[in-house]
Amino acid sequence: MPRPGRPQAVVVGAGPVGLTAAHELARRGVRVRVVDGADGPAPTSRAVAVHPRTLETFAQMGIVGELLPRGRKNRAFTMYAGGRRLVRLEADYASMPTSYPYTLIAAQKDTEAVLRLAVARLGVHIEWGTRLTSFEQDEERVLLRLERDGRTEVVETSWLIGCDGGHSTVRKQLGLELIGESSERWMLADAPVDTDLPPDTIYWAHTGGQALMMVPYAREGHWRLLDTAPAADTTARAAAGRLAAKLSAGLGRDVRVGEPEWTSVFTFQQRMVERMQQGRVFVAGDAAHVHSPASGQGMNTGVQEAYNLAWKLAQVEQGHAGRALLDSYSRERVPVGRKLLGSTRTATFLVQLKNLLASAALPVVFSVVRSLRPLRRAIQRKVLGGMSGLRIGYPSSPLTTHDSYHYVSSLGPVAVAGTVCGPFPRPGERVTAARVHDPHSSGCRALHDELRDPRWTLLLAAGGTGAGDVPTDVAVTAAVQYGEWLSVRTVGGTPGGPAPLADPGASLRRALGLAAGCWLLVRPDGYVAARGGALTRAALEQALAPVGPTTPLAGAAPREPDLAPHTPVSRPKEL
């Protein structure tokens, strides 16, 4: 047993990825230390785009309300070439329901500030100026050597998470190789820009020889600029003059750029590791993959990885699941990273577009796009689908159970073996892929409140019985036996089943495709693990088997459960 006060996990790196991991571990009661070799928070921002799926994750963490006022909601992408506007692509989330149908443009330093406040509320102190120098591990523990102010500290912990960036010490000492390619130099700049263009869209401007991007910050008159062909002289004054000239040529209007507050010239890379775990040590974020900034995916992907890993690590550390659960981290996230390399490679080509013949064809191509609305909408949805993160799922995960499901239409059951009938969330998909985003629906609000519970969620539609088993009895047994890590809710129920979840008018049950007695099992990160018709012990045991709970589901409920919704101390209260 670990000693009292001994950290159960150590996170290396206090950027957005490390802070997300620390928050979610601490929210689940895991003792965690966060160390970072820097002297303090970074004053500059590489990442500026927070995509919808990341906003959904921050909502589950209870912090999205603090971040939204710090950013600007972007719903469009406008393209110019040679001074002529080609097309404006509007955000179209009709096929991807979400409560956040936009990309939030927020400086990374602001995102980190919100996360630092959140981890501080959970009692986590960031140890700045503390550098990991080495570590070793065995079956029982990890021993770290930390250096601060010339002194070395040896720390014992159960788990180590490397969120320490592209030059990760953790990754290098694990011997994990970043596989991929390096490419050309680009420049990022944060600068005041004087232009008559409205700051309601991201702008792409092609000069005839290269392309640039302008992204509006919430701070009036300030923009993030991306130059795909920076000159050798990168001083602030020289950079401002070149950017102004290039943007004026591409946009066809006078653009004045003030001296940048910050610039960074870098050689972007497209690389990733082939596995993200070795024993008790994990990597996430830039420690596991580095990307072109063209589609703004690096930070967003890292946050998703940290969230994916933290709940699994907490469940294993607290004895509610076997260590095999942790194998699903690499199995789920490496394919996402691999697919992302392909999409960012395509985005990089389109953003820089140095081919003169291709640039000459742009007006012709986009005149067709403008005139054909179905084509324009298809392009908008394709681009958003790749960037938003809303279509990422885990259908092939070992935690996803595929079986014969009962999907319903107007609460009438329709049995479909292994296929989908209706727009209901399938195993492996986000539960919020359903149309559950009406802020006026008390059922939808209740579901989103439930998703902020750090546990798994079993949703049972009120009513209904099954052959040999009564769904309510199975739900009560599960609530009693697994209540520490499983929240059991009766959707639309009355005080006769576990923790009724309000659903007047059955709008939530219709959106989720749940007839009486049907059920849905949702992972702590909001993805559907399984669903089925009448809830039986066999069906629930099959769905939970990949998790590896330490005790099997009992044959009968040993005692009456507390039927009120369980509220962990660290559960966020905001709606």
Image (cartoon, rainbow, N blue to C red):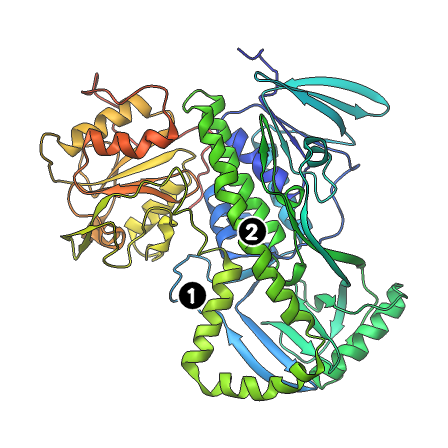
The nearer-to-camera label among 1 and 2 is: 2
| Sequence-first tag of 1 and 2 | 1
Tell me if residue 105 comes above or below residue 501 in the rendering: below
Q: Secondary structure at mark 2?
A: helix
Bin the neighbour count of mark 1 within 10 Å (Cα to Cα): few under 14, some 14-19, many 20 and up.
some
Bin the neighbour count of mark 2 within 10 Å (Cα to Cα): few under 14, some 14-19, many 20 and up.
some
- Residue at the image point whose x is 11% and y is 40% from the top: 464
Asked if disc 1 and disc 2 are in contact, CB closer than 8 Å, the reply is: no
* Residue 186 seen by the camera: yes
Question: Looking at numbered disc 1 in the image, what kind of residue is underneath it?
Answer: Tyr
User: In the picture provided, is 202 more to the left or to the right than 417?
Assistant: right
Residue placed most toward the observer, 562 or 277? 277
- Gap in Å between the C-alphas at discs 1 and 2? 24 Å
Determine which quarter of the picture holds residue 521: top left
Question: Looking at numbered disc 2 in the image, what kind of residue is underneath it?
Answer: Arg
Residue that mark 2 sits on: 338
Residue 524 at what x, y percent from top left? Answer: 41, 38
- Residue at the image point whose x is 44% and y is 79% from the top: 375
Residue that mark 1 sits on: 93
Residue placed most toward the observer, 517 or 353? 353
